[in-house]
Image: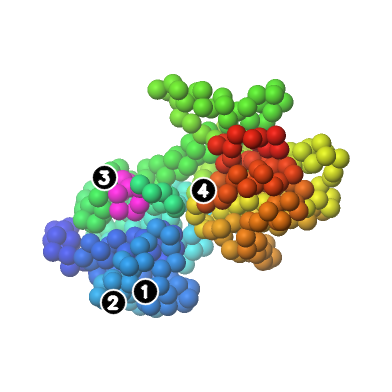
Amino acid sequence: MKEKLLKKIEEKEIVVGVVGLGYVGLPLAVEKAKAGYKTIGFDVQEQKVNMVNEGHNYIGDVVDNDLEKLVESGMLSATTDFSFVKDVDFIAICVPTPLDIHQQPDISYVRSSAEEISRYLTKETMVVLESTTYPGTTEELIKPILESGSGLKCGEDFYLGFSPERVDPGNLIYKTKNTPKVVGAIGKDATEVISAMYRSVLEGEVYEVSSPAIAEMEKILENTYRNINIGLVNELTMLCKEMGISMWEVIEAAKSKPYGFQAFYPGPGLGGHCIPLDPYYLSWKAREYGFHTSMIESSMMINDRMPEYCVERAGMILNKSKKSLNGAEILVLGVAYKQDIDDYRESPALKVIEELEKTGADVSYYDPWVKEYKYKGKKYVSEKELTEELLRKADLVMVTAAHTNVDYALVQRCAKAVFDTKNAMKMITERENIELL
């Protein structure tokens, strides 16, 4: 099986399947197709499938023209019909792994995808889970489902591995194609073949590890490392406020050291599809072993509290003008979870707005990237333009995303008061009405 698959990879005879056509899956499917592999995308959302088949892109990291050409040439197609799994040689599972209402891992999408695949899985197929999850998922959950549903044996009839997605929306340097990839599979042969498949497509290094669990833990480490360091900086920011010190200036000074320090920055909380979620997966799994991840849990508590802290600070700023949050008009600038993207998954700005509304504030928002969003069943629509009138009307302007296509000079000139939680206005010299987090 190993030699047959390696030969098919070399001769570009592999048919690729990608389950889940979101921020991870669609860019991966495009890269596979661009590398010369016929690729089939699977998704339960018919709207996404139709858009792909029409050559209409909906992911920022995919070049519109690339998608259109690949669809027209027949190298890339999409379907909701999982029976086409029988036609593929390589399957990447790229489905969401959110948290449930109890902040515990929701792996229902991974489980249902594995069940669908198992019904049509054929011999000599590579299956790779890319969705971020807790250590043990590939071997403890996916492997039994695939074996029982297909009647095939892992390692003998098919290969199974884990290769964590690494996607940074809006990153102008690192995309799917040139970001290094980690691969951990069940058995040396599986690791070799799956790695060869990725090497034939990607420009970044493919780093092999000894098991899926190592690769799963590696992914958790990446984002837990960031969660903890951001938590440290957020806590010190709150302390610096009490001490009358600018944490932003402290960080810039610390950055002058050429070794032993990496800069992390404070903000209104954590956003995105990884950093706010991954530590919960690890702390949940750790309890199975009677182990409490105290440092991780402490950082999560700090970061989770930041939206409330920012609202408290907003109230303090308004108090200086003898105003209260109740009845105040607040304009929020930016609801995306990071600058210059349209992705608002887990954005702390949404929680900030929710907390502001709880106080009785009249909240509106402007985001040139996010025209509207839904949060807890409610639809929010952005102001169409950032005008002088809109800024002058607000009792307070809160900057919660550092978009570069916002006229911050206009904001400073027209706003009564500005609370900048992202240091987006650092280049503005006139600062009488600006307060930093």
* Residue span colored magenta: 174-183
Type of residue at label 3?
Glu
419 is within the stretch colored magenta? no
Residues at marks 3 and 1 touching, judged by CB atoms closer than 8 Å: no
Residue at x 51%, y 34% (from the top left corner): 264
Looking at the image, residue 81 lies above or below residue 262: below
Q: Quadrant of residue 302?
A: top right
Q: Which residue is mark 2?
A: 72
Here the colouring is rainbow
Q: Which residue is mark 3?
A: 205
Q: State whether residue 146 appears in this view.
A: no
Q: Which residue is mark 1?
A: 55
Of discs 2 and 4, which sits in the foreground?
4
Which one is earlier in the sequence, the residue at label 2 or at label 1? 1
Q: Residues within 10 Å of mark 1 (few under 14, many from 20)?
A: many
Report the Cα–Cα distance between label 1 and label 4: 29 Å
Which one is earlier in the sequence, the residue at label 3 or at label 1? 1
- Secondary structure beneath label 1: loop
Q: Which residue is mark 4?
A: 404
The residue nearer to you, when weighing 135 against 367, is 367
